[in-house]
Amino acid sequence: MYIELKNINKNFGAYKASNNVSFALPAGSLSAFLGPSGSGKTTILRIIAGLETPDSGDIFIDGQRVNDIAPAKRGIGFVFQNYALFRYMNVFENIAFGMKIKKVPANKIKKRVEELTELIGLKGLENRYPVQLSGGQKQRVAFARAIAPEPKVLLLDEPFAAIDAKIRKELRQWLKTTIKKLNITSIFVTHDQDEASEVADEILIINKGRVEQSGSPLAVYKKPTTPFVAQFIGENSLINNYDIFKGFYRQEGFSTAVIRPEFISIFKENEEYKNAYTTEPGIVKTVTFRGSYLEVIVDLHDTELKTVWPTDREILHPNEKVGVLIKKMYLVDSANIREVENEALIADNSVII
């Protein structure tokens, strides 16, 4: 493994920012630290960079323990959330800065900057200053400056946070493609689930200074292993009285159910559908256009549930009566998670006519 953390702990007074964190990432991987604000994501990133010192534990990069190695000598490029460009330097000078510090010959600096301005799509803008650039252009310059000295590892702290939504989406794919082209081991911090899922090979879910779960975006979404991950990932409905729904029963110790939109199917009154026995009457509360689909809030037993409706089907309207089928849910308590299927649905499907 190229980056490895073993039993990392870091406290800021009474606050435990890193709680016995251990993980290993392979060379060339693009990983995301995903979690809510204050979860410890950036602290772990800064510990890898050497900008924070752990209270205990070890950090390895390419097999070398780097705890006692200065940040500038760890071979790490860092892209900050707010660009951190030098406003009195133009694009060329900003990108060249790290190489000048390392006393790289001027002709090699010129060649490298030319390569990078081509890579980031800003060729011809070398003489512009940060104030003359858009947010997306500034972040590309910050990226080029970080990789100019050819670091072994690239760390990015919420790199798209200061950029508007449309440009942010465009930059995600650009970042993934560019990092893969460079084959540089990279980690980026984000609280945006879509961003992490779209860009990263592997996601590490961080909560209260701990790694709750790690794996591919699909694996983490499909198979959450802790109550926090089940509730944090996805657009969920959290229900306490889950036994009011047909096919589900109160299970000892589990006080809350997590129901994802895809666990729910809804049907118009005039539709023929399978599993009629397990479907209950509900009322559409709101319908919100989300581009490729409609987000629907449906009322079932005075409980609001979130699901989706394809845009190519006959439109749904608020106050419309619909059939609602809950296929499964996650039951969670403070420490455990259990996936349960609709028992009525199982029984319904087992009937042979």
Image (tube, grey):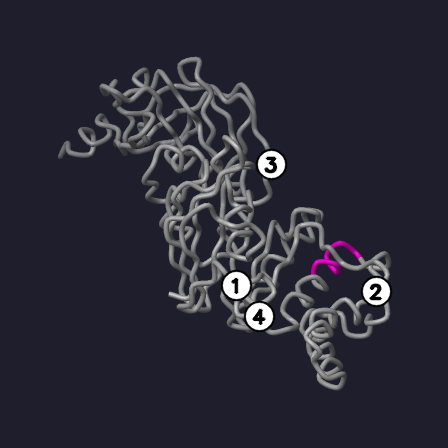
The correct choice, above or below, for 311 with respect to 45 in the image is above
Q: Position of residue 257 (x, y in %)?
A: 35, 25
The N terminus - image quarter: bottom left
Q: For the residue carrying disc 2, how many other residues have a C-alpha within 10 Å: few (<14), some (14-19), or many (20+)? A: some
Question: What secondary structure is found at the residue carrying circle 2?
Answer: loop
- For badge 3, the amino acid type reads Phe
- For badge 4, the amino acid type reads Pro
Indicate left or right for 106 with 52 as reference. right
Mark 1 / mark 4, whichever is N-terminal: 1
Front-most of 291 and 189?
A: 189
Front-most of 162 and 261?
A: 162
Report, in whole angstroms, how far the alpha carbon at label 3 lies from the one at label 1. 52 Å
Q: Nearer the viewer, mark 1 or mark 2?
A: 1
Report, in whole angstroms, how far the alpha carbon at label 1 lies from the one at label 2. 29 Å
- For badge 1, the amino acid type reads Ile
The circle on residue 289 is: 3
Indicate left or right for 184 with 353 as reference. right
Q: Nearer the viewer, mark 3 or mark 1?
A: 1
Mark 4 / mark 3, whichever is N-terminal: 4
Q: Nearer the viewer, mark 1 or mark 4?
A: 1
Q: Nearer the viewer, mark 3 or mark 2?
A: 2
Query: Mark 4 highlights which residue?
Result: 151
The circle on residue 69 is: 1
Q: Position of residue 348 (x, y in %)?
A: 20, 29
Report, in whole angstroms, how far the alpha carbon at label 3 lies from the one at label 2. 44 Å
Tell me the magenta residue range.
134-139
Q: Position of residue 344 (x, y in %)?
A: 22, 25
Query: Mark 2 highlights which residue?
Result: 89
Q: Residue furthest left?
A: 352
The C terminus - image quarter: top left
